[in-house]
Each structure stands twice: as C-alpha cells, then as structure tokens.
Image (tube, rainbow, N blue to C red):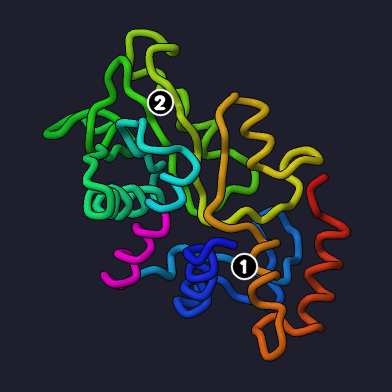
Amino acid sequence: MEDYKKEFIDFMISSQVLKFGEFTLKSGRLSPFFMNAGAYVTGSQLVRLGEFYAKAIRENFGDDFDILFGPSYKGIPLAVATVIAYSRLYGKEIRYCSNRKEIKDHGDTGILLGSKIIDGDRIVMIEDVTTSGKSIEETLPVIKSQCSSPDSVKIVGLIVSLDRMEKGKGEKCALEEITNLYGFPARAIVSMKDVVEALHVPGGIITDKIKEKIDAYYAKYGAV
C-alpha cells in the first residue's frame, strides 16, 4: 500500500471522519463503520484533504484534465481544496466547478458555481463517498447540458475518498456500477480492504471483535 494511503487512513481516524461501532445508513443497513466527510472542519484538515485527493487523482487519471467538478453540497469544498492542492503540489491550474441545487436568476446567474464548462473540457468529478451513484445520475445531465452537445465534454473519471466495497443498486459495488453504466473509471483514495489491512494489527483500532462484525457485514452486503 502506498504511503499516502496509509497516511490518509490515519488522517480519517484522527479527524473522527471514519468511526467504528453500529450505524444505521440511509439504506437501512446496520453498518459497523461510518464515514462522515462533514467532520473535516478546520483549515489544516482541508489543506491535507486536498493534498490526498490531488495525489490520488494524479495517480489514477494523470494531469490531462481541465475541470474538477464537485456536486453540491459536500463536493464544493472538496473541489476547492483539491484544485488549490493541485496547483501547489504540481504547478498545474485546474478550474473548479460545482452545481447549485436551484438556478440563480440574478447576479452570477445559472446553475453553476466557479468555472463555466465549455466544449472540449475534460472533467474529473469528486465526491466523498458514493453508495448508489444518485448524485452522478443527477449531475451528469447538468454538466452535459452546458455544451453544444453531450459528447463535446469528456468525463475523465470520478474520485471518492472511500470505496465501501458493498453492493450498490445491484450485486456490484457502486463504483463499478458507475463505470459500467457511464463508461468512465470510478476510483477511491482507499478501500475498506485497505482500511482493514492498515488498522487490524496488534494494538490497532480494528480489534478482532470489530473485524468479525465487518466480516459479517460483507458476508451480507459485500459486492460481488
């Protein structure tokens, strides 16, 4: 496992973003772990978070893209923090863009925040985590509608912080379902497999008891 992935796992724990216990998800599933990106609230946390995302994006997609798109609302600070980090780490200026929930009809009008999207733009999408791909389903039409035709903009890929590795709408995990449905790669900084590997060690946060609960969860909800 790359060093930055191990560091990111420790960062999620120290920021109290990734927790272990019993959590009821929106899906109704009772999960032994939970990730809440809303717990990143300080300047130093956002600086580091942007750096981790920037490293993962560069590793998975390279530098050949123009816009980092963060679906509202959680995707907005993620996109902003990451384009800042990308500029500082790699000297490349990436534009940020997000969507509004409602169209604004005065001042800075329209459905978008940040950069406009134009024909020929290559876009990486950024989110905290996805379990159903619903936000992608909602925002892709917004992105495509900004150009002269749906094919005049290219989605390079999607990056999330954690791959939960559980079933989405079908038997595959949400990231694989997104790739199969839309044709672009969907990647994560780390997966739950990485998390267990890093933390289920002597004296680690994931004890044998927690590991048993995680194994039981994946026996029921793990992606094929």
Query: Within the image, what quadrant is residue 26 found in?
Result: bottom right
Q: Main secondary structure of the magenta part?
A: helix
Amino acid type of the residue tagged 2 in the rendering: Val
Residue 107 is covered by the magenta coloring: no
Residue 160 visible in rendering: yes
Q: Residue furthest front?
A: 2
Q: Which mark is residue 142?
A: 2
Q: Which mark is residue 34?
A: 1
18 lies left or right of 66: right
Amino acid type of the residue tagged 1 in the rendering: Phe
Q: Position of residue 24 (x, y in %)?
A: 69, 66
Query: Camera-side residue: 224 or 198?
Result: 198
Q: Position of residue 121 (x, y in %)?
A: 32, 23
Q: Position of residue 151 (x, y in %)?
A: 44, 12
Figure check: 130 above or below 138: below
Instruction: Give SS at disc 1.
Output: strand
Figure check: 126 above or below 206: above
| Residue depicted at 87% across the width and 57% down the height | 220
Q: Which mark is residue 219?
A: none
Query: Camera-side residue: 96 or 140?
Result: 96
Instruction: Give SS at disc 2.
Output: helix
| Residue depicted at 35% across the width and 66% down the height | 48
Q: Which residues are magenta?
A: 42-53
Figure check: 87 above or below 28: above
Crowd class of label 1 (few under 14; some 14 to 19; many from 20; radius 10 Å):
some
| Residue depicted at 84% across the width and 75% down the height | 212
Q: Residue furthest left?
A: 107
